């Protein structure tokens, strides 16, 4: 069964557009690491810094799915905006 990673912002001609990527877990992992994110304060809609891809494991689900790159900002996971 697939785990919806969600959408990431990408640039196309200077414009940021979301891209949805579906990942299938292998050995209980999605094959990438993240950095960033601070707890929400004062009922903010989003985290203060954002969450970014810091590493993509070679031959892991994220690598095989293509499209996900280091430094991409994760903007939604399983329909939850972050």
Image: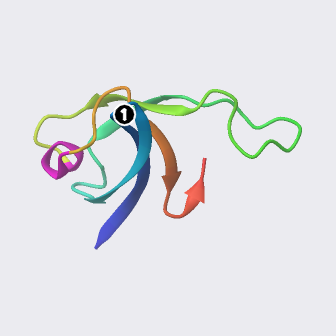
Q: Give above or below for 52 relative to 27.
A: above
Q: From the viewer's perspective, is 59 left or right of 25?
A: left
Task: Say left or right for 71 vs 31.
Answer: right
Q: Where is residue 63 shown, x and y percent of the image?
A: 17, 42
Give the residue drawn at x 43%, y 32%: 34
Task: Tell me which corner region of the image, top left, top right, bottom left or bottom right, holds residue 13.
Answer: top left
Q: Indicate how the structure is coloured in the image.
A: rainbow
User: Would you call the spot at circle 1 few (<14 residues within 10 Å), some (14-19), or many (20 or more)?
Assistant: some
The residue positioned 63% from the left and 27% from the top of the image is: 49
Residue that appears at 18% across and 52% down: 65
Instruction: Please say if 65 is above or below 11.
Output: below
The residue pinned by badge 1 equals 33
Residue segment shown in magenta: 61-66
* Percent coordinates x, y for residue 7 in the rendering: 43, 52
Secondary structure at numbered mark 1: strand
Q: Is residue 14 left or right of residue 55?
A: right
28, above or below 79, in the image = above
The residue at 83%/35% (across/down) is 41
Whether residue 75 sits left or right of residue 25 in the image: it is: right
Q: Position of residue 36 (x, y in %)?
A: 55, 26
Q: Is residue 30 magenta?
A: no
- In magenta stretch: residue 65: yes
- What quarter of the picture does the N terminus occupy? bottom left
């Amino acid at each position: 069964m697939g785990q919806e990673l969600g959408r990431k912002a990408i640039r196309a001609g200077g414009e940021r557009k979301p891209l949805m990527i579906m990942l299938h877990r292998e050995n209980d992992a999605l094959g990438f690491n993240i950095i960033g994110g601070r707890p929400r304060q004062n009922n903010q809609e989003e985290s203060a810094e954002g969450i970014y891809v810091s590493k993509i494991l070679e031959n892991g689900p994220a690598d095989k799915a293509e499209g996900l790159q280091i430094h991409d900002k994760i903007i939604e996971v399983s329909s939850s905006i972050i």
